[in-house]
Image (cartoon, rainbow, N blue to C red):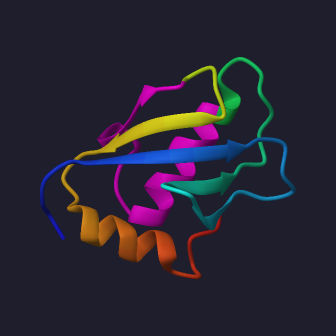
């Protein structure tokens, strides 16, 4: 599943009852995380959820835009966009 880096747009809803990938949100992906918007906890929860979903180490995921916003841009290192899309659509993309 190795490939080029993939850039994702996310719409994040913090404070959910559980962390999960909800589905498409326009051009972005809707993500719910069980962490609150405090001291970077929601950002860490987003990275944790994506790392678990893609079965890769956390260091391969970087938030490159929107650290203080619900709309984020994330780069996933070493995974092609088709592999990322397949994983995000999988019903197992919850933590």
**79 within the magenta span:** no
Along the line of sight, which residue is nearer the eye, 7 or 53?
7
Residue sitting at x 59%, y 82%: 91
- Residue 39 relative to residue 24: left or right: right
* Residue at the farthest left position: 3
Along the line of sight, which residue is nearer the eye, 81 or 95?
81
For residue 70, above or below residue 4 = above
- Whole-percent x and y of residue 53? 48, 64
Residue sitting at x 77%, y 27%: 37
Along the line of sight, which residue is nearer the eye, 75 or 94?
75
For residue 11, above or below residue 81 = above
Write down the quadrant of residue 35 in the picture: top right
Residue sitting at x 34%, y 56%: 56
Residue sitting at x 78%, y 48%: 34
Write down the quadrant of residue 62 in the picture: top left
**55 within the magenta span:** yes
- Residue 31 relative to residue 54: left or right: right
- Whole-percent x and y of residue 61? 37, 41
Q: How many marks?
A: 0
* Residue at the farthest bottom position: 91
- Whole-percent x and y of residue 95? 65, 64
For residue 19, above or below residue 14 = below
* Residue at the farthest front position: 26
**Which portion, as a residue range, is magenta?**
43-66
- Residue 1 relative to residue 15: left or right: left
Write down the quadrant of residue 14 in the picture: top right
- Whole-percent x and y of residue 41? 69, 29
- Assign the magenta stretch its main secondary structure: helix
- Residue 77 relative to residue 92: left or right: left
Q: Quadrant of the N terminus?
A: bottom left
């Amino acid at each position: 599943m190795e490939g080029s880096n993939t850039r994702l747009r996310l719409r994040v809803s913090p404070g959910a009852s559980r962390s999960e990938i909800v589905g498409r949100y326009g051009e972005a992906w809707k993500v719910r995380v069980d962490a609150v918007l405090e001291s970077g906890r929601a950002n860490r929860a987003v990275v944790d959820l994506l790392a678990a979903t893609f079965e890769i180490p956390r260091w391969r995921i970087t938030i490159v835009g929107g650290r203080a916003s619900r709309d984020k841009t994330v780069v996933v290192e070493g995974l092609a966009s088709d592999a990322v899309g397949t994983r995000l659509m999988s019903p197992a993309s919850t933590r």
